[in-house]
Amino acid sequence: MTSNFQTYLLTGVFASQIIVISFYAPQRWRRSCALLLERYPAEQYPRLYPLPKQEIERKLAIFKATHLAIGFGATAVFVAALLFARSPYWFAVCMGESVVVQFTVPLYIIALPLWIRISKGLRAMPPPHRRSAELRQWRVTDFVSPLWIGLGFGLQTLGLACSAAVYLYWLNAHTILPLVIATGTGACLLGVMTYTLLAPQGAARPDPYLSGADTFRVRQRRYRMRFGAGAFYGIFQTFYLLLSAQLIRIDSAYQYVIPSVLLQLGALLLVSNADYGFATRDFSVYRADSGTQAAP
C-alpha cells in the first residue's frame, strides 16, 4: 500500500482494534471477575454464586484462551494485510472481517451464555426470609429523563422513516441487505422502548437478594441503555442507509473505520460498567449469615 493519510488512519484503527477488543478489555473484565472470586469467596457468599465456582473458573479460562487466540490471529492478519494488501480498501476489508470475529465470538459464544445462566440462577434462588416492601408505583421517568425518552423514540422513528424512503425510492441490489439489517434492528429497538414505556414493571429484579439501592441502579442502567440505544442507533441507521443508497458518499475504505471505532467504544463501555458495578455494589447481602432484606 502507498503511504498516505488513509493508510496511516486504517493502520492505527486496526492496531487499536486488536489491542482494545482482544487484549485490554478482556483483561480488565477477567481481572474484575478474579477480584470478585477472591474478595467474596463462595464459602462465605454462597448466594452470589448460583453456579459452581469451578464451572465459572473454567468458563473464564476458555474465555481467556479464546480471546488470546483470536487476538494473535488478528495480529497475523494485520501484519499480512500491511505487507500484501493491494490497496487501502482491501486492508480495510481485513480489518472489518477481523473485528466481527474479535467482538462477536467471545461475547456471544462464551460471555453472554455464561451471564444468562448466572442471571437465571440468581433469579431462581429462594427468596430471603426477611423481605421488605415499598408501596410505591415506579414510573419510567423515575429511571430515565423524558429528554432521553423523546430522543429514543424520535431518532428511531427518523431511522425507520429513512428505511421507508430507501425502500420506496432507492431500492436496488446495494441497498437490500443494509435495509433488512437496519430496519429489523430498528424495529426491535422501537418495540423494546414501547414495551418499556407501557409496561415499566417488566424490568424484573435481577435476583432476590439485591439491595434496594443496587436494584434501583440496575433498573436505571437498563432503562438508560434502552432509550440511549434507540437514539444512537437511529442516527447510525439513518447514516448507514443514506450511505448505502449513495446519497452520502465517502471512500469505501472509511466505511470500515466507523464500525471498528464503535465496537471499540462498546467494549470499553462494557468493562467500565462492570468495574463500576463491582466498586459500588453492596455484596454484604450475599453473605451466608446476613439478615437480608430484599428490594421491592
Image (cartoon, grey):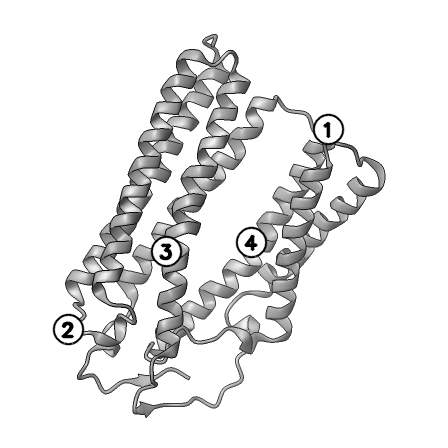
Image quarter (top left, top right, bottom left or bottom right) of the C terminus: bottom left
For residue 285, what is the image quadrant?
Answer: bottom left
Q: Is residue 21 left or right of residue 244?
A: left
Badge 2 amino acid = Glu
Q: Who's the residue at 20% across and 83% down the image?
A: 290
Q: Is residue 127 above or below residue 182?
A: below
Figure check: 36 above or below 172: below
- What is the C-alpha distance between the residues marked 1 and 4? 25 Å
Q: Earlier in the sequence, mark 4 or mark 2?
A: 2
Residue highlighted by disc 1: 246
Q: Where does the image place residue 268, in percent across and percent down from the top left?
A: 38, 45
Distance from Cα at disc 4 to Cα at disc 2: 39 Å
Q: Which residue is mark 3?
A: 273
**Residue at the disc numbered 2:** 43
Q: How dense is the environment of label 4, judged by Cα within 10 Å: few (below 14), some, or many (20 and up)? A: some
In the image, what residue type sits under mark 4? Ala
SS type, badge 4: helix
Asked if residue 90 is positioned above or below residue 286 in the image, the reply reads above
Query: Which badge, 3 or 1, is on the more N-terminal residue?
Result: 1
Residue 23: percent from the left, percent from the top?
A: 30, 38
> How far across and how far down the image is residue 269, in percent?
40, 49
Which amino acid type is marked by label 3? Answer: Asn
Q: Are marks 4 and 3 in contact (CB under 8 Å)?
A: no
Q: Earlier in the sequence, mark 1 or mark 2?
A: 2
Q: Going from the N terminus, do you reach mark 1 or mark 4 first?
A: 4
Check disc 4 and report the residue beneath it.
229
Counting from the top left corner in percent of width and height, residue 77 is at 39, 24
